[in-house]
């Protein structure tokens, strides 16, 4: 089971980086993600209906968790679109993916009085250094244009932290497919509030309909793989492994989108991944 969980989570990281590449390449990021949610809901609807036949009555605590999951996923999808409007894939992706495994242990130490080993602190330092390098932060040119994508990426990473923990708890009440479909509907509603006045809906579909359909399959499909892995192993062990997608995403941005700072950002993504793995040990 351990090897299956590891395989699932590595595939999940790769798939996550691929659909993030699609989002970055799209014309209107919010519209693209909105279409992807529609495609995802329709693609996974038969599985959702089948799985719901086996769901028993959900207690109030379970409903509250699922509602919180829908809200955090919705905020994540809206902010993700905005982040890719103003930031490079190879810059913001490592920050978003590195923040989550950084925040969880820090919360445990600072708020829950948990203990972190010396190796764990080395991992945290590695993540911080990698994020600092990836952000291309320079003290002599601090302004709104340079700081905004970094801050947005940090907020998106915070949303990832929140929904990962909430979804782990929600799986006590529903299956991964059911939870994923519900959050897809939530993402659709959240993005609908953003794009209801957009004039680029038809153009986005015309230009990117193939990537939309593929993204509608990959985005929820990759997360379902992760949820299945979480069911097989503790989230504290399995979640850090998913950050291998940081390296994939950075390479996509540099090799396929021809973004600058290639060697620096690749090094940053490797440092973040190494820090995450060290922390998980």
Image (tube, helix red, strand yellow):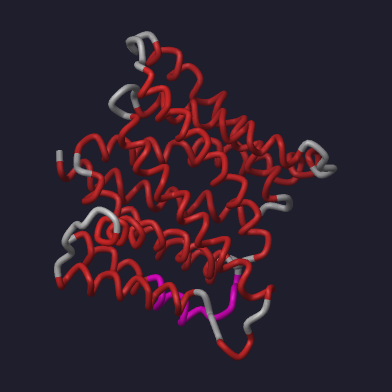
Magenta span: helix, strand or loop, mainly?
helix
What residue is shown at x 78% (from left), y 39% (from top)? 201
- Which stretch did the figure color magenta? 258-269
The reply, left or right, for residue 21 in relation to residue 65 is right
Q: Is residue 92 magenta?
A: no
Q: Nearer the viewer, residue 99 or 31?
A: 99
Q: Residue furthest right?
A: 199
- The image quadrant where one finds the C terminus is bottom left
Where residue 18 appears, x then y in whole percent? Answer: 49, 52
Please tell me whether residue 39 is drawn above or below residue 102 in the rendered image: above
Please tell me whether residue 234 is drawn above or below residue 240 in the rendered image: above
The reply, left or right, for residue 221 in relation to residue 144 is left
Where residue 202 appears, x then y in whole percent? Answer: 80, 38
- The image quadrant where one finds the N terminus is top left
Q: Residue furthest bottom?
A: 140
Where residue 53 appears, x then y in whole percent? Answer: 38, 8
What residue is shown at x 71% (from left), y 36% (from top)? 193
Q: How many marks?
A: 0
Q: Nearer the viewer, residue 258 or 184?
A: 184
Q: Nearer the viewer, residue 115 or 71?
A: 115
Q: Is residue 267 magenta?
A: yes
What residue is shown at x 83% (from left), y 39% (from top)? 197
Please tell me whether residue 260 is drawn above or below residue 237 in the rendered image: below
Where residue 172 appears, x then y in whole percent? Answer: 28, 26
């Amino acid at each position: 089971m351990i090897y299956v969980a590891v395989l699932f989570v590595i595939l999940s990281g790769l798939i996550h980086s691929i659909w993030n590449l699609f989002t970055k390449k799209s014309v209107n990021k919010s519209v693209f993600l909105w279409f992807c949610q529609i495609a995802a809901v329709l693609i996974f609807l038969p599985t959702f209906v089948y799985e719901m036949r086996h769901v028993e009555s959900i207690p109030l605590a379970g409903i509250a968790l699922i509602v919180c999951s829908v809200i955090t996923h919705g905020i994540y999808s809206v902010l993700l679109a905005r982040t890719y409007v103003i930031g490079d894939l190879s810059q913001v992706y490592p920050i978003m993916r590195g923040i989550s495994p950084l925040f969880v242990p820090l919360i445990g130490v600072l708020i829950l009085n948990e203990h972190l080993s010396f190796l764990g602190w080395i991992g945290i330092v590695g993540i911080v250094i990698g994020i600092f390098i990836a952000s291309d932060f320079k003290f002599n040119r601090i302004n709104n244009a340079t700081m905004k994508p970094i801050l947005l990426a940090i907020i998106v990473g915070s949303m990832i932290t929140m929904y990962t923990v909430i979804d782990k708890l929600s799986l006590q009440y529903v299956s991964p497919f059911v939870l994923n479909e519900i959050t897809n509907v939530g993402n659709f509603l959240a993005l609908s509030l953003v794009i209801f006045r957009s004039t680029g809906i038809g153009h986005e579909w015309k230009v990117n309909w193939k990537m939309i359909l593929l993204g509608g399959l990959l985005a929820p499909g990759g997360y379902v793989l992760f949820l299945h892995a979480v069911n097989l192993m503790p989230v504290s062990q399995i979640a850090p492994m998913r950050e291998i997608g940081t390296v994939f995403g950075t390479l996509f941005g540099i090799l396929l989108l021809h973004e600058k700072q290639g060697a620096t950002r690749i090094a940053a993504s490797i440092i973040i991944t190494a820090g995450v793995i060290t922390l998980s040990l």
